[in-house]
Amino acid sequence: MTIAETPSATTSAEAADSEPREQPYPEPQQSNAEKLAEWAVNSITELRWGVTVNLGDYESARLEATALVSLGQDPSSILALLQTWVSEHSPPTRNQWEDMIAQKHQLEAKLQDLNRQVRWSQEQWDAVRRFLLENNLPLPARVIDDLPF
C-alpha cells in the first residue's frame, strides 16, 4: 500500500491572510446621479410642462408648454424655463382669485379711509380759513401753495 503525500491543508484563516480577496462587485466608476445626468443630456429630446387650473363651477383650464432639447443641452435648465413660463402665463386658480378679491376689498377700504381723511382735513382747513378771514388775519402764503386741494 502506497501513501501519497499531499500538501497539508491550510485553515481558512491562514488562507485569508495569504491570498488577497476579490471584491464581489467592482466599485462603480460613476454614481447613479452622474449616470442619470449623462443619460438626460444624451437622451432627452423634448420636455413638456403644464398645469391644470380649477376655475370653479366644474370648469378648468390647462396650459402646457413644450421645448425641444438640443444634443448636449442640460434639460434641467430648460425645464426650469418651462416652469417659469407656465406659471407666469397660467390663469389664476380659485384660491388666487379669492386672494385677489380679498386684496381688492382691503385696498378699497383703505381708499375710503384716505378719502375720509382728506375730507376731514379740508373741512378743518376751511374752518381755519373762515376764522382767519372773519378776524381780518392774513392767510399764510406758504400753506396755501402746499395744500393739494
Image: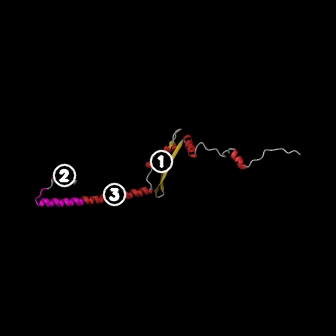
Residue drawn 15% across the image and 55% down it: 140
Q: CA distance from mark 3 to mark 1?
A: 31 Å
Highlighted range, magenta: 119-138
Residue drawn 31% across the image and 58% down it: 110
Residue furthest to the left: 136
Dot 3 or dot 2: first in sequence order is 3
SS at mark 1 in the image: helix
> How many marks overall?
3
Of residues 9 and 142, which is closer to you in this image?
A: 9
Mark 2 and mark 1 in contact (Cβ < 8 Å)? Answer: no
In this rendering, position of residue 110 left or right of residue 80: left
Q: Amino acid at mark 2?
A: Asp
Residue drawn 58% across the image and 46% down it: 32
Q: Amino acid at mark 1?
A: Gln
Return the residue at label 3.
107
Return the residue at label 2.
145
Q: x%, y% of residue 50?
A: 49, 49
Mark 1 and mark 3 in contact (Cβ < 8 Å)? Answer: no
In this rendering, position of residue 85 left or right of residue 118: right
Give neighbour class at mark 3: few <14, some 14-19, many 20+ (Cα, 10 Å): few
SS at mark 2 in the image: helix
Q: Amino acid at mark 3?
A: Leu
Dot 1 or dot 2: first in sequence order is 1
Q: x%, y% of residue 84?
A: 45, 47
The label shown at residue 83 is: 1
SS at mark 3 in the image: helix
Give neighbour class at mark 1: few <14, some 14-19, many 20+ (Cα, 10 Å): some
Task: Tell me the chief SS of the magenta region.
Answer: helix
Magenta region includes residue 129: yes
Give neighbour class at mark 2: few <14, some 14-19, many 20+ (Cα, 10 Å): few
Please identify, in this view, whether the residue under mark 3 or under mark 2 is nearer the observer.
2
Q: x%, y% of residue 79?
A: 50, 45
